[in-house]
């Protein structure tokens, strides 16, 4: 593991050659591609495991005790001493092999020394998790400085042996099974684990075990399996290497079929545009766009290169077209790769030169059919959910490309609606190809949940949606979209529908037992419901001249008597017939759902029902790329099938983790079933995480499939209008994209035109000098911190909270983990004494915050000697594009303004002062000031002045709270004594109260000194910390401070006191 020739260390300079495979643009065969990825992924995993061991073992503080045994003074979150280890079973080798077929062992350890959170992490171990068994024997005496310098890492750690193992099951102190997902323990029988001892049954590596045992027999070496004294785990998200390596190995050993239309492009050969939809056979000639277009103007805007002709279903011209629309896509798009609407580079094919009129191309006619959608039914729940997003022409181009067969690539700059576009592709695809199944893959659970929550807002029935993996619990919905949750929902829905069938039978004066099972309901539909409908239609055909005929003769009138509005008016035959068809559609949908529930009636076991749901019922299945790799073997075994693959965040996914989801199904008769592959991402933002610099820089392992396809010249659609940030903020990063503009929404909406209260500018670079004579520091390698920036950022955060900015609208980002932890410490130290301030929404690194956003971002760049990894422009783009309304960057100006790669952004930032500019006249979080109006500017000279402003505001707020408290006490006293005090005495008491209030306000006015007076920090903060506990601070439920507290004139204080009393009375 520590052989530098196999796994180079992180200090790769970029010079010279290494004995490593490379991932370039082209590959010889699929086997060559897989073999390179296999070798690199194995080495990268080894390096990460090595780093985790080096991180965990030193915290244990191993030493040799008086008995000569290894003991541990310290503790580690990820490693625990072993109480007992024994091999429980060694099974006979399979025929033709010498290694055992299975080796099982039992490991016992105690979690008594851990606090609750870490205990729960150890208790969460489950089947297939990979653990590591370590043997540690430290030297009897500490190594000298010279010996330490010459020693290898294992020698310094005292590390003798490392062996991997896989969890089979985990039991508590009483032997009760924990975390069982096989169905042996039913949900309602689950109990929390007992005691502090845990016993894990593990499967050892059989090949390694055979080698070790052979060495003991042949050479008389030490029995490794009697020496293990540490059990180590890793973070679950980083510990999926075994499943991915097994998947790659299995793919190398089978004939992996990539679709013919994708094969050459995947290897990097042939025409880059060969897989674009315009060059594919079997196109959808006419596409029903459902709710994609909001009105006819939207269609005209989206196809500006065409002359739009709206027609009815019978081909007559429609002068007042309304959605939904069907569009017959023009044939010329097939031969013109740039013919997508909204694509700036659209050109005229050479053959069309004759169609030029007066030097301008003659617009081709595009026929758009405006049809009347069938009535879905008379109940509110029958009405389909509608899209409200007005898609741009480029987004419409992406949707057209996505619903047609072939490879579609969509580049989505920050805030351009990638997720909305992806969801609409899924929606239109479901309605145009209802028999096809779509697989959604993303890099993170967060992105998958965002996508899934938006799909639920579209007209796709919930019974066709399935979410696999561990992140399902984080979905912001009452519905359970896991396999078990969907099965339960189907069973509940079955009972609801059968009761409706019984009601229908009653309304028709038939026996109710037809609603006993889904099968009997099916016969009831054919014999009694559908036959009555056919007879009704036949009668209607002969009586179209009678306006009340439908109302009189409709056979299911009694069943629909409970609708919110009367179904029939009796005024028009056509209108009533339309409503009658809607009612029949409701019945048809009801019996169709019952037919789908029939399988759950026949299958009795939970596992069978869940597998049927995944392989047959669900039309849209969502999972992360990690889950796809982990469960590939299971998917193949169950016969999982899908026609379309949509991949979000595909520029953040390792190439091999993008490839595996394409092959989660067995080929049919030697052909791949996959018809569409839609990749959505942004190669200008951060690439996949590869920790080893040699593999990242030399082997290009951090190149995603999306980025490789872009480099190969495969056509893509780049979304070109952002709707996230103020236009002024978007200028900081839109230079990196081709033609990134702004949606009208961010130019016209009031929130984007109002200034940030208390600040003169909406974005600023704040120069932070050395703090106590120090800039950046690194307590350990790569663990950079900057105390000055941390203190400054927390002061600005406190200032915003005191103005009344909600905590959940502010995020603090930094470029290093060390700084993230330091900022959290400073927040705990400085904000904890005041419950009304609280922590911000998130304190995290830029890399972890990719794909998320917030209204206000405070960013710390940390470094003061070297630019560091921010020199990667992709990281800069992510950092600059997270804020919607305000971005404040704290850094060392002299360092970053000289960095050539960052010039376009920093030139814009440095057009404003590099001292924080505040507007101290604004004392609440709302203002009517326009964003371009700075108001009176006060430049903050540095951290000390910012701290004094914050302390002054806290002190002033404390005064206001004290007056409010006194007023409450007087009010309570006067209410108690009201029955015994005469009117005159009461007046006197009120007079004395007003005197007190006035004098208190006068004191407040005396305190109202300018912040320039630099109030001493210790004199204000320390007394406040001791007094604050007893103060009845009135704070809002979301942690937002009541803005009125901050107003310092007498009337405002009185008003605040009154409002506090009102809220208490409530």
Image: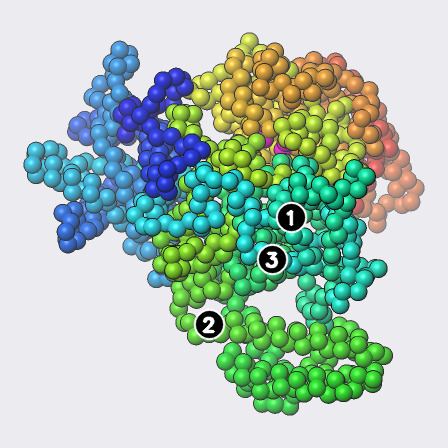
Task: Identify the residue under disc 2.
Answer: 599
Q: CA distance from mark 2 to mark 3?
A: 32 Å
In the picture of the structure, the residue carrying the numbered disc 3 is 284
Report crowding for label 1: few under 14, some 14 to 19, many 20 or more residues within 10 A (C-alpha): some
Q: Nearer the viewer, mark 3 or mark 1?
A: 1
Q: Can residue 283 be found in the magenta stretch?
A: no
Would you call the spot at circle 2 few (<14 residues within 10 Å), some (14-19), or many (20 or more)? some
The residues colored magenta run: 878-882
Q: Alpha carbon of mark 1 to alpha carbon of mark 2: how far?
A: 44 Å
Query: Residue at the top extreme?
Result: 773
- Measuring from the top left, give residue 554's x and y in whole percent: 73, 84
Looking at the image, is 681 positioned above or below residue 377? above
Alpha carbon separation for disc pair 3 and 1: 13 Å
252 vs 749, left or right, is: left
- Please tell me whether mark 1 sits on a helix, a strand or a loop: helix
Height in image: 309 above or below 70?
A: below
Quadrant where the N terminus lies? top left
Report the disc number at residue 333: 1
Between 785 and 556, the residue placed more toward the observer is 556
């Amino acid at each position: 593991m520590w052989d530098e020739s196999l796994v180079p260390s992180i200090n790769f300079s970029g010079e010279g050659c290494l004995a490593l495979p490379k991932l370039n643009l082209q590959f010889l065969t699929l086997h060559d591609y897989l073999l390179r990825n296999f070798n690199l992924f194995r080495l990268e995993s080894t390096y990460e495991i090595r780093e985790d061991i080096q991180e965990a073992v030193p915290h244990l503080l191993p030493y040799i005790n008086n008995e000569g045994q290894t003991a541990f003074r310290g503790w580690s979150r990820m490693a625990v001493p072993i109480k007992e280890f024994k091999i429980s079973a060694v099974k006979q080798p399979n025929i033709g092999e010498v290694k055992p077929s299975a080796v099982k062992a039992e490991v016992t350890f105690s979690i008594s020394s851990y606090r609750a959170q870490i205990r729960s992490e150890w208790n969460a171990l489950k089947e297939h998790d990979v653990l590591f068994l370590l043997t540690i024997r430290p030297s009897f005496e500490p190594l000298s400085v010279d010996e330490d310098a010459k020693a290898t890492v294992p020698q310094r750690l005292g590390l003798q042996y490392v062996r991997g193992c896989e969890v089979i099951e985990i039991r508590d102190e009483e032997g009760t099974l924990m975390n069982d997902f096989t169905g042996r323990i039913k949900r309602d029988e689950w109990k929390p684990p007992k005691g502090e001892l845990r016993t894990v049954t593990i499967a050892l590596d059989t090949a390694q075990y055979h080698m070790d045992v052979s060495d003991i027999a042949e050479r008389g070496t030490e029995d490794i399996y009697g020496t293990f004294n540490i059990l180590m785990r890793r973070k679950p998200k980083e510990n999926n290497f075994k499943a991915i390596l097994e998947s790659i190995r299995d793919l190398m050993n089978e004939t992996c079929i990539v679709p013919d239309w994708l094969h050459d492009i995947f290897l990097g050969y042939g025409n880059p545009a060969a897989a674009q939809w315009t060059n594919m056979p079997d196109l959808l000639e006419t596409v029903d766009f459902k709710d994609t277009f909001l009105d006819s103007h939207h269609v005209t805007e989206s196809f500006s290169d065409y002359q739009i002709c709206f027609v009815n279903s019978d081909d007559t011209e429609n002068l007042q077209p309304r959605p939904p629309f069907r569009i017959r896509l023009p044939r010329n798009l097939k031969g013109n790769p740039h013919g997508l609407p909204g694509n700036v580079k659209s050109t005229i094919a050479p053959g069309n030169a004759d169609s030029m009129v007066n030097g301008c191309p003659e617009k081709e006619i595009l026929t758009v059919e405006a049809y009347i959608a069938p009535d879905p039914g008379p109940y509110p729940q029958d009405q389909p959910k509608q899209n409200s997003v007005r898609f741009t022409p480029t987004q419409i181009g992406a949707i057209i490309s996505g619903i047609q067969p072939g490879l579609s690539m969509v580049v989505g700059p920050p805030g351009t609606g990638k997720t909305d576009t992806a969801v609409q592709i899924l929606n239109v695809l479901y309605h145009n190809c209802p028999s096809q199944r779509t697989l959604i893959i993303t890099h993170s659970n967060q992105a998958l949940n965002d996508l899934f929550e938006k799909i639920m807002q579209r007209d796709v029935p919930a019974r066709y949606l399935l979410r696999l993996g561990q992140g399902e619990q984080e979905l912001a919905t009452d519905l359970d979209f896991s396999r078990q949750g969907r099965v339960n929902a189907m069973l509940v829905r079955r009972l609801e529908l059968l009761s409706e069938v019984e009601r229908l039978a009653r309304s028709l004066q038939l026996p109710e037992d037809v609603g006993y099972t889904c099968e009997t309901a099916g016969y009831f539909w054919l014999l009694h419901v559908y036959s009555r409908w056919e007879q009704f239609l036949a009668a209607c055909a002969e009586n179209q001249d009678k306006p009340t005929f439908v109302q009189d003769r409709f056979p299911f009138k009694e069943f629909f008597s409970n609708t919110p509005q009367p179904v029939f008016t009796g005024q028009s035959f056509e209108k009533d017939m339309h409503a009658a068809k809607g009612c029949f559609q409701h019945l048809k949908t009801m019996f169709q759902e019952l037919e789908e529930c029939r399988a759950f009636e026949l299958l009795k076991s939970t596992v069978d029902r869940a597998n049927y749901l995944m392989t047959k019922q669900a039309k849209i299945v969502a999972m992360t790329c990690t889950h796809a790799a982990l469960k590939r073997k299971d998917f193949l075994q169950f016969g999982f099938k899908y026609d379309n693959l949509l991949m979000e965040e595909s520029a953040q996914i390792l190439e091999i983790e993008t490839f595996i989801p394409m092959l989660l199904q067995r080929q049919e008769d030697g052909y791949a079933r996959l018809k569409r592959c839609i990749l959505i991402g942004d190669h200008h933002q951060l690439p996949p995480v590869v920790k080893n610099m040699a593999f990242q820089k030399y082997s290009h392992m951090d190149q995603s499939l999306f980025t490789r396809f872009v480099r190969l010249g495969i056509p893509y659609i780049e979304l070109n209008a952002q709707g996230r940030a103020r236009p002024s903020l978007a200028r900081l990063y839109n230079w990196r994209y081709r033609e990134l503009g702004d949606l009208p929404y961010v130019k016209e909406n009031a929130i984007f035109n109002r200034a940030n209260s208390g600040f003169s500018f909406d974005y600023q670079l704040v120069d932070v000098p050395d703090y106590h004579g120090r800039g950046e520091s690194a307590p350990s390698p790569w663990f950079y911190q900057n105390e000055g920036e941390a203190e400054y950022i927390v002061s600005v955060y406190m200032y915003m909270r005191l103005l009344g900015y909600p905590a959940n609208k502010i995020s603090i980002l930094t470029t290093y983990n060390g700084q993230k932890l330091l900022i959290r410490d400073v927040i705990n130290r400085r904000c904890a004494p005041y419950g009304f301030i609280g922590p911000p929404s998130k304190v995290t690194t830029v890399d972890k915050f990719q794909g998320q956003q917030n209204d206000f971002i405070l960013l710390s760049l940390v470094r003061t000697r070297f630019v560091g990894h921010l020199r990667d422009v992709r990281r800069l783009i992510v950092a600059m594009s997270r804020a919607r309304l305000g971005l404040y960057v704290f850094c060392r100006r002299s360092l970053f303004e000289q960095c050539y790669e960052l010039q376009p952004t920093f030139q814009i930032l440095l057009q404003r002062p590099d001292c924080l500019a505040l507007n101290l006249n604004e004392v609440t979080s709302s203002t009517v000031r326009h964003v371009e109006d700075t108001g009176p500017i006060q430049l903050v000279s540095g951290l000390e002045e910012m701290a004094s402003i914050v302390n002054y505001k806290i002190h002033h707020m404390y005064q206001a709270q004290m007056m409010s408290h006194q007023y409450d006490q007087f009010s309570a006293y006067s209410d108690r004594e009201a029955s015994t005090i005469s009117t005159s005495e009461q007046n006197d008491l009120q007079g004395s109260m007003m005197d007190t209030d006035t004098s208190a306000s006068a004191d407040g006015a005396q305190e109202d000194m300018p912040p320039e007076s630099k109030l001493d920090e210790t004199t204000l903060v320390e007394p406040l910390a001791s007094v604050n506990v007893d103060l009845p601070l009135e704070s809002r439920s979301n942690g937002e401070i009541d803005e009125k507290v901050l107003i310092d004139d007498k009337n405002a204080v009185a008003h605040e006191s009154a409002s506090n009393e009102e809220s208490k009375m409530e």
